[in-house]
Image: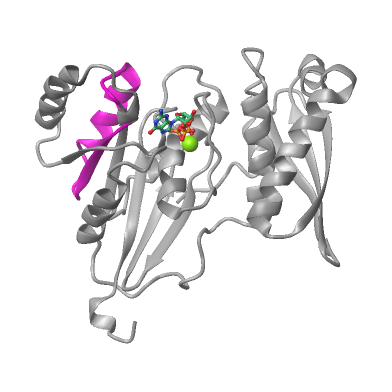
Amino acid sequence: MTDTTSNRCGYVAIVGRPNVGKSTLLNHILGQKLAITSRKPQTTRHNMLGIKTEGAVQAIYVDTPGMHKANEKALNRYMNKTASAALKDVDVVIFVVDRTRWTDEDQMVLERVQYVQGPVIVALNKTDRIEDKAELMPHLTWLQEQLPNAQIMPISAQHGHNLEALERVIAEHLPENEHFFPEDQITDRSSRFLAAELVREKIMRQLGAELPYQITVEIEEFKQQGKTLHIHALILVERDGQKKIIIGDKGERIKRIGTEARRDMELLFDSKVMLNLWVKVKGGWSDDERALRSLGYNDQV
Ligand SMILES: Nc1nc2c(ncn2[C@@H]2O[C@H](COP(=O)(O)OP(=O)(O)OP(=O)(O)O)[C@@H](O)[C@H]2O)c(=O)[nH]1
Ligand SMILES: [Mg+2]
């Protein structure tokens, strides 16, 4: 570490349409669950840094919301803008795609990535689920034609296949630089933010098709008292019916959300956690620019 000339450090944006496995990839690379993930599209809403320092190399990953088309609410505009902003001023771009499942939204991301000047890696994810390997070759050829300078790497973010090779390629592209963050820092986000996200993840995972996308979580209290961390989280929904869904029959569902979120928080914060959850109706927040800002949807990387 004293040989400063060989230190490398840079930003690596992870982009792609919703649900392709960007946050799963970040977590696996970090070896820790930092970003929330779910089977539903549009899980990630904010750019988040995940920092990995190994010896002379510091890679600063930027997990981004999936770029998407439908639904032009203020929240969706915010998410798309946030993801696009991450493409600027980074040293490497990882464009994550889901096997051969190419959609209009992949096309939209591709058109943005084609403008990127620096190195691009296409991570063809979920290879563990590829049934027909023969399908893959023509798709890889086609992808290479679209992005002639990109390196295409099949991976499985969930199972960790080929991630070491991916990290090696990333490291080669990082410029010589002093490290921007201390060695033990893994994110730019506060513990409060991470706690709120864990609650949101449990809601996303537990609700089925009736899922209210119009949910946000605010942390009202976050206080260490002795050995216990006391956390109060407020779940904001848009309509009364959504509140009922989250609370569930005799409060069953909210209890389960609380138990699961608390478990993850205890792992993340390495502390005993007392978690209190409240649900409140705040109509129209997801399409109200001012309400969004007041709820913290105003960050840019
Ligand atoms: N089989 C398999 N599933 C995966 C893999 N990577 C991710 N998934 C699953 O794909 C789903 C979406 O993963 P996320 O990491 O939340 O996807 P994302 O791209 O961050 O999605 P947004 O935040 O909505 O943009 C989850 O159910 C993951 O478990 C993989 O390599 N193999
Ligand atoms: Mg995500």
Q: Nearer the viewer, residue 235 or 258?
A: 258
Q: Nearer the viewer, residue 93 or 86?
A: 93
* Left or right side of 230 for 285: left
Quadrant for residue 91, please give it: bottom left
Q: Is residue 85 visible?
A: yes
Indicate the position of residue 101 as horizontal and vertical percent values.
Answer: 30, 18
Q: State the residue lying farthest toward the right.
A: 250
In the displayed structure, 272 sits above or below 157; it is below
Q: Residue at x 35, y 33 (%)?
A: 16
Indicate the position of residue 195 as horizontal and vertical percent values.
Answer: 68, 48
Q: How many marks?
A: 0
**101 drawn magenta:** yes
In the displayed structure, 133 sits above or below 210; it is below
**204 drawn magenta:** no
Indicate the position of residue 92 as horizontal and vertical percent values.
Answer: 26, 51
Q: Is residue 286 visible?
A: no
Q: Quadrant of ligand 1?
A: top left
Q: State the residue lying farthest toward the bottom.
A: 2
Residues in magenta, as a range: 99-125
Indicate the position of residue 298 as horizontal and vertical percent values.
Answer: 57, 44
* Left or right side of 188 for 164: left
Q: Residue at x 51, y 66 (%)?
A: 185
What quarter of the picture does the N terminus occupy? bottom left
* Left or right side of 220 for 59: left
Quadrant for residue 100, please give it: top left
In the displayed structure, 128 sits above or below 7; it is above
Quadrant for residue 9, please give it: bottom left
Q: Residue at x 31, y 17 (%)?
A: 103
Q: Residue at x 21, y 44 (%)?
A: 120
* Left or right side of 276 for 203: left
